[in-house]
Image: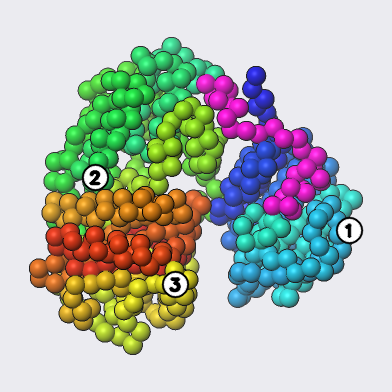
């Protein structure tokens, strides 16, 4: 018997940014079904739920067009928890006072809880519990009927409530790991204040997902473009379960921009799942031909996107997948289905998706099935595990669609490295994200390898804040030649350089896997930079990061022995001159360099 809940108990109202998903995921981790809705969802729709959480967001309540909620929500009898922007919005709408802030408060603070309340059950009074703050504006006066429950050194209203009406608000973020009692506070809200029952376990929803696949597909068949990634593989497997091996087909496009062994891995994986159901489309020559001589990152992405469109159109046409008896399957997951307030207007940092016209037509005609569209990434893994997919597949790090092309940096002209006060300026450009805007700037190299205690990472953060005109800092792990003697070489995407990167990536991946380091990071890009000597024209940058969803990330330090082993193995690759370690968090650097 499945015990899936047909309706969510908790609704998280999206006030912009990514916090809403973080909150909904945390509530689901407590075993309670939560979903995200637009912030202005009508109160009548929210009233029957057990509780509502208003998320944080980057705007000011005073800004034109900033997210708001239906004010009737506060009289609907449903418990509400406002977080960060949610607190400010409650103060603003209910008759308190919000003050615009210029500098804001970012990072750790200590919560001084003056009064207890059901939300803070188990949290010590007048304690020094660490909380994480990220806000510009602050509430200066609580609305009538509310009392201030907690403060921090710089924040007069860190927590407030109208306990009788079950309206609560906190300025800090209970959903992030740095808030040490955050989980307890969410638990108190969900169970103590709202009275939710545990009803959520993604594995138990498999029967429901399968019946929905039947409803969507009817007596037609499903085809997928598979990537070898977790989402498309799990979605494919669910369709196999629902419809049987005769009715599910897949294509994998080999762009020639894949990692070493990738195409074989994908072939083996699908041959085991459903022999003959997934075919490999070899398109290396087409992609590499179109990319010849191209150097600019966004142009690379555009070309790769266009070639993908061509191949997919060709496959759809030649295999008659556009006919009425086929529909398209996709591995879309929950966060990708919602156009959130924060991402709707976000400045374009990098182009990620291209919609194939043929695919677009299928979507418009409703001929699409997305079995994972209500799940988060970690839930997709749990479902995959339940379906018996191997851990090796489920624990794969994400890999970008344009593949190695965006990890093989190019340069327009020869240029020497320049000595500056703090280190060496490498005249290659990499993409960053600063103040929500894209930046494209040179890299600063420090002449030493990062120690595992993270101290050089800290220095890097400080340098980026201080020095104008850079967005990334690397440490030198090892080099065959002094940094002063290196040059950036005019270079494009060539088969030779791609092969060099492929080997470097395979070396790092092997050592990272064998040492167990790969389990401590979320993703580990390996970048080839056209920096070196005449004989060894390229260098390698290691970029291990920890992240939740790729939106923000922290550069992860590595033990000295493993760094040295990687550098040794990398310097044995023909044409590799030096090995660097990327010390930059995101922001200000993006995870990938392009
Ligand atoms: P950035 O570099 O923007 O990366 O910090 C965030 C996450 O997105 C992946 N990424 C891409 N994925 N197409 C993709 O499918 C792309 O063009 C692309 N660019 C970056 C990146 O690997 C990281 O996981």
Q: Which mark is residue 457?
A: 3
289 over 17 or under it: above or below? above
The mark that comes first in sequence, 3 or 2, is 2
Mark nearer the viewer, 1 or 3: 3
The mark that comes first in sequence, 1 or 2, is 1
Q: Mark 1 falls on what kind of element?
A: loop
| Quarter of the figure with residue 44 | top right
* The furthest residue to the left: 535
464 over 410 or under it: above or below? below
- Determine the main secondary structure of the stretch shown in magenta: helix
- Chosen colour scheme: rainbow
Quadrant of the frame with the N terminus: top right
Label 2 neighbour load within 10 Å: few <14, some 14-19, many 20+: some
Task: Look at 26% across and 50% down and name the residue there.
Answer: 506
Total count of labels? 3
* The furthest residue to the bottom: 421
Asked if the magenta segment contains residue 350, the reply would be no
Q: Which residue is mark 2?
A: 260
Q: Which residue is mark 1?
A: 145
């Amino acid at each position: 018997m499945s015990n899936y809940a047909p309706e969510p108990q908790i609704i998280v109202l999206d006030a912009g940014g990514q916090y809403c998903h973080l909150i909904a995921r945390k509530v689901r981790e407590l075993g309670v079904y939560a979903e995200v809705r637009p912030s202005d969802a009508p109160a009548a729709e929210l009233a029957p739920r057990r509780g509502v959480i208003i998320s944080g967001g980057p705007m000011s309540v005073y800004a034109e067009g900033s997210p708001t909620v239906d004010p009737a929500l506060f009289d609907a009898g449903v418990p509400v928890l406002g977080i960060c922007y949610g607190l400010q919005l409650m103060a603003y709408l209910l008759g308190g006072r919000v003050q615009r802030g210029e500098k804001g408060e970012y990072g750790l603070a200590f919560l001084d809880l003056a009064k207890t309340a059901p939300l803070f059950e188990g949290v010590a009074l007048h304690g020094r519990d660490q909380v994480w703050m990220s806000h510009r504006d602050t509430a200066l006066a609580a609305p009538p009927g509310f009392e201030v429950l907690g403060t921090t050194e710089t924040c007069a209203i860190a927590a407030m409530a109208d306990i009788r009406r079950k309206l609560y608000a906190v300025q800090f973020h209970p959903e992030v790991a740095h808030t040490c009692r955050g989980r307890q506070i969410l638990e108190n809200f969900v169970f103590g204040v709202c009275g939710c029952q545990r009803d959520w376990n993604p594995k138990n929803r498999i029967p429901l997902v399968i019946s929905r696949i039947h409803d969507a597909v009817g007596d037609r068949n499903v085809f997928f473009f598979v990537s070898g990634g977790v989402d498309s593989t799990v979605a494919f497997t669910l369709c196999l379960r629902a419809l049987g091996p005769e009715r599910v087909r897949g294509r994998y496009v080999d762009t020639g921009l894949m990692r070493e062994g990738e195409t074989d891995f994908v072939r083996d994986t699908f041959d085991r799942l459903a022999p003959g159901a997934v075919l490999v489309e070899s398109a290396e020559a087409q992609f590499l031909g179109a990319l010849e001589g191209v150097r600019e990152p966004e142009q690379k992405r555009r070309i790769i996107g266009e070639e993908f469109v061509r191949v997919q159109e060709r496959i759809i046409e030649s295999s008659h997948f556009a006919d009425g008896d086929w529909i398209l399957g996709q591995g879309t997951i929950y966060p990708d289905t919602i156009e959130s307030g924060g991402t709707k207007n976000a400045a374009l940092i990098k182009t990620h998706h291209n919609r194939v016209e043929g695919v677009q037509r299928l979507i418009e005609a409703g001929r699409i099935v997305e079995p994972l569209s209500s799940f988060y990434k970690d839930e997709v893994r749990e479902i995959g595990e339940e379906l018996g997919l191997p851990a090796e597949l489920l624990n794969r790090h994400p890999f970008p669609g344009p593949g190695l092309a965006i990890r093989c940096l190019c340069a327009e002209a020869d240029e020497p490295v320049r000595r500056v006060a703090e280190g060496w300026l490498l005249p290659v450009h990499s993409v960053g994200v600063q103040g929500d805007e894209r930046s494209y700037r040179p890299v600063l190299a420090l002449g030493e390898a990062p120690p595992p205690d993270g101290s050089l990472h800290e220095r890097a953060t400080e340098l980026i804040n201080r020095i104008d005109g850079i967005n990334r800092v690397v440490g030198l792990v090892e080099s065959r030649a002094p940094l002063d003697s290196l040059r950036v070489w005019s270079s494009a995407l060539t088969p030779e350089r791609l092969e060099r990167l492929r080997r470097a990536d395979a070396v790092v991946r092997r050592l990272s896997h064998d040492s167990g380091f790969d389990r401590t990071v979320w993703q580990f890009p390996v970048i080839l930079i056209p920096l070196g000597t005449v004989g060894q024209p390229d260098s390698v940058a290691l970029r291990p990061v920890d992240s939740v969803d790729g939106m923000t990330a922290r550069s992860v330090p590595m033990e000295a022995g493993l760094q040295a082993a990687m550098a040794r193995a990398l310097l044995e690759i023909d044409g590799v001159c030096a090995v660097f370690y990327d010390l930059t968090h995101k922001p200000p650097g993006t995870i990938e360099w392009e």
